[in-house]
């Protein structure tokens, strides 16, 4: 399995609803019911802190906070433009 151009959460949750709340994910974007583990070395040269507004804004957002309407946020996130292989 693989995921192209993905956001990466550093915390593990047992419930999709908790993941959605922590990473402020709209149900229209994802049901967050798939969790994968992978070797970070495969993307280490192409990982960065995304910007606000879905990586289109001007301010870096290392901790989720931009979409309070979708959850509490407060968790670290990264992003890659590489394909992640699980």
Image (spheres, grey):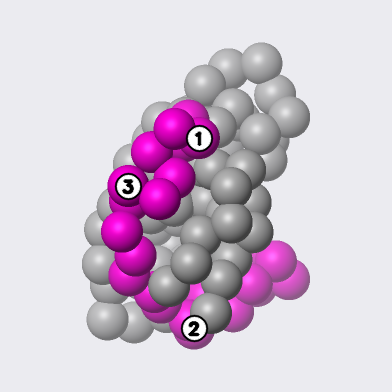
For the point 63% across and 51% down, the residue is: 5
Question: What residue span does the magenta drawing correspond to?
Answer: 25-48
Does the magenta-highlighted stretch encompass residue 28? Answer: yes
First in sequence, mark 1 or 2: give its number.
2
Q: Residues within 10 Å of mark 2 (few under 14, many from 20)?
A: few
First in sequence, mark 2 or 3: give its number.
2
Q: Which residue is mark 3?
A: 41
| Front label number (2 vs 3) | 3
- The number of numbered discs placed on residues in the rendered structure image is 3
Q: Which mark is residue 46?
A: 1
Q: Furthest residue to the top?
A: 58
Q: How far apart are the two marked residues, 1 and 2, measured between alpha carbons?
A: 25 Å
Q: Which residue is mark 2?
A: 33
> Magenta: predominant secondary structure element?
loop
Q: Residues within 10 Å of mark 3 (few under 14, many from 20)?
A: few
For the point 70% across and 24% down, the residue is: 57
């Amino acid at each position: 399995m693989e995921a192209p151009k993905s956001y990466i959460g550093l915390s593990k949750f047992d419930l999709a609803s908790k993941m959605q709340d922590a990473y402020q994910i709209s149900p229209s974007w994802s049901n967050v019911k798939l969790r994968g583990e992978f070797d970070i070395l495969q993307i280490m040269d192409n990982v960065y802190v995304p910007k606000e507004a879905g990586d289109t804004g001007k301010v870096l957002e290392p901790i989720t906070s931009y979409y309070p309407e979708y959850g509490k946020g407060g968790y670290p996130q990264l992003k890659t433009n590489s394909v992640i292989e699980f």
